[in-house]
């Protein structure tokens, strides 16, 4: 089978990444999009639309993997008047105010407290976590208060500390 543009077609699996490939396939079924890709090194991008519930706005979402990391980005999102200041559970350095892209903090990713792995079922982890984040974000935009639970990202030694 011929590789095209350095990407692996959906039907080809790289032997070193079968778990990540399975996760890519599961997310691609939930968010079918012709732009979904998996690179030869096992990294992927999944694009789609998501909302917290039927009464919520729909948002463009991107799942991006790199190494053992999974980033969840919401694109074209309405920003608060004061920008990203005060918005909890985001990674500011990976978010872009100009384009309305927010990088979500959805889970702990510490060595002894890792809440996510690529072996997890996305419909039981990353998808409901994202929907919950959207729900609380929409409340935050209305009230200025975050009603969700979990730990907020904290700065330690100049770097973002990933917590849920």
Image (cartoon, rainbow, N blue to C red):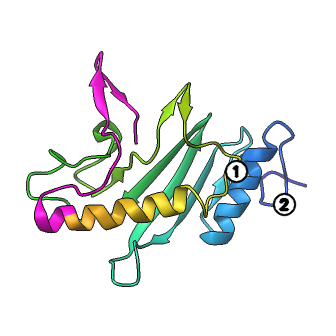
Q: Position of residue 82 (x, y in %)?
A: 8, 52
**Rendered image: mark on residue 5:** 1
Magenta span of residues: 140-164
> For the residues carrying marks 2 and 1, which lies nearer the camera in this image?
2
Residue drawn at x 60%, y 60% as measured from the top left: 124
Number of residues whose C-alpha sits closer than 10 Å to that of mark 1, classed few (under 14), some (14–19) or many (20 or more): few
Counting from the top left corner in percent of width and height, residue 161 is at 37, 29
Query: Looking at the rendering, which quadrant does residue 147 occupy?
Result: bottom left
Camera sees residue 1:
yes
* Residue drawn at the location 30% of the way across and 15% of the way down: 157
Residue at the extreme left: 82
Residue underneath mark 2: 11
Q: Nearer the viewer, residue 2 or 18?
A: 18
Residue sitting at 68 percent across and 70 percent down? 29
Q: Residue at x 72, y 50 (%)?
A: 7
Rounded to the nearest angstrom, the CA distance separating label 2 from label 1 is 15 Å
Q: Quadrant of residue 34?
A: bottom right
Q: Main secondary structure of the magenta part?
A: loop
């Amino acid at each position: 089978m011929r590789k095209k543009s350095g990407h692996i077609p959906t039907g080809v699996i790289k032997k070193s990444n079968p778990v990540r490939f399975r996760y890519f396939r599961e997310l691609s079924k939930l968010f079918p999009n012709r732009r979904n890709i998996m690179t030869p090194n096992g990294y992927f991008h999944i694009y789609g639309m998501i909302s917290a519930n039927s009464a919520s706005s729909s948002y463009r979402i991107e799942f991006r993997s790199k190494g053992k990391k999974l980033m969840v980005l919401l694109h074209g999102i309405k920003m608060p008047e004061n920008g990203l200041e005060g918005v909890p559970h985001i990674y500011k350095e990976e978010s872009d105010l100009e384009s309305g892209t927010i990088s979500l903090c959805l889970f702990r990713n510490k060595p002894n407290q890792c809440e996510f792995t690529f072996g997890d079922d996305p419909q039981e982890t990353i998808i409901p976590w994202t929907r919950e984040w959207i729900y609380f974000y929409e409340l935050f935009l209305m009230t200025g208060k975050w009603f969700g639970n979990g730990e907020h990202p904290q700065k330690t030694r100049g770097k973002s500390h990933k917590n849920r």
